[in-house]
Amino acid sequence: MKKVNKLGINTICTHVGELKDEQFKGAISPIYMATSYQFDDVDIKRYPRYFNTPNQEALTRKIAALEKTESGLIFGSGMAAISTAMLAFLKQGDHVVLQETLYGGTYNFVVEEFDKFGIEYSFTKSLLIEDFKKEIKSNTRVIFIETPSNPLLKIVDMKAVASLAKTEGIITMIDNTFASPINQTPSDFGIDIMIHSATKYMGGHSDILAGAVAASNEHIERIWNLAKNLGGSLSDFTVWMLERSMKTMNLRVKKQSENALEMANYLEEHAKVDKVYYPGLQSHESYDIAKSQMKYFGGMLSFEFNDTINVEQFQRNLKLIKPSMSLAGVESTVLNPSKTSHALLSSEEREAQGIKDGLIRFSVGIEETEDLIADIEQAIEKL
Ligand SMILES: *Cc1c(COP(=O)(O)O)cnc(C)c1O
């Protein structure tokens, strides 16, 4: 795959792909809302659902530069990106290997939809490479991973998965949402297709729903062929908003990652906390792999209080940190997976996945950590 990334990270975030305002010399990309473009001699038929409006193409260049790939596509949601990418490479009779723990929406998409397309699937027993190997069959076309994973921040060895897939002629896809391209660039390790819920770190302000895919020209063309038929494109206003948000992505994600490491250290020392899950802690089961493939360790962590703490009351007592569903915004949020994202599973199913009822997932924002710590301390004190 051709590497196109020569500029520094903040320069890419700020400038790559930007559209020039030739008419007024404005400082930012103009926004082109047209759904209809006059034909010219050049054989480009621009139309939003063809993923080729000026703003879509501009933002795609930024995302591809960040993921060090040739090309990319922007979608109306993370799930539009994930479903389109998977279905572009899987047909009736094919088989896909998926990692044991995946984002709930991806899991639902596979188990609720694949049977009717005649696509076979297996989930690995663990995140160890041997367990990926065990699931591969003669008709396996895709291996799909997500590292760090939600909500326990488990780590998959990307290089090992990519080389296993290469020897078998299998395409590899990663949901790179949690790390963002700031914290890891899977193409460096041989992963073929990078997918994002841009709703999270790319957007970063809890006000945009979007998805993105980055890959080689050849793979993007294959995904595009299906994407134009499924029609999951993003409105150009939101594309423009996302371009604006991504200018500060490195600043935000770096600060969030620094904060998360500090909060993880604080929580690990806390007398009322039993366990902290964060790939940047030496106590993490895959710390060495995380260190070898991540720049910072991301803004997401999870922890378990001991049983003296009423988790629901604790969350109600918080003043600054908001209990809420989504993640990756500049504001800190917490969520109790057993009551929200994993509420549809039984207690036993959750336990089997290592998700205890007292587990709290923490999306660390850009606030000052002393204020976050003070908020947690006052919420505990009030119990
Ligand atoms: C949120 C999320 C998605 C789905 O993205 P939407 O934008 O909500 O469609 C997929 N993967 C991960 C890891 C997510 O956090």
Image (cartoon, rainbow, N blue to C red):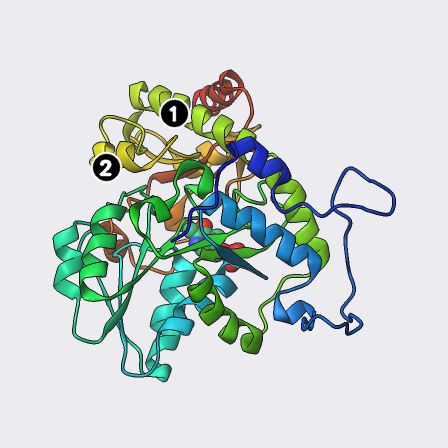
Element at label 1: helix
Indicate the amino acid at tag 2. Answer: Ile
Q: Is mark 1 within 8 Å of ligand 1?
A: no
Q: Are there few (<14), some (14-19), or many (20+) residues within 10 Å of tag 1?
A: many
Q: Is mark 2 within 8 Å of ligand 1?
A: no
The residue at 64%/71% (across/down) is 49
The residue at 39%/76% (across/down) is 113
Instruction: Please indicate, yes or no, whether residue 330 appears anywhere in the rendered image.
Output: no
Residue 289's label in the rendered image is 2
Residue bearing the label numbered 1: 261
| 336 displayed left or right of 252 | left
Place of residue 140 in the rendered image (x, y in percent of width and height, measured from the top left): 23, 71
Instruction: Please indicate, yes or no, whether residue 59 appears anywhere in the rendered image.
Output: yes
Label whose residue precedes the other's in the sequence (1 or 2): 1
Farthest residue, direction right: 24
**Closest to the observer: 207 or 39?**
39
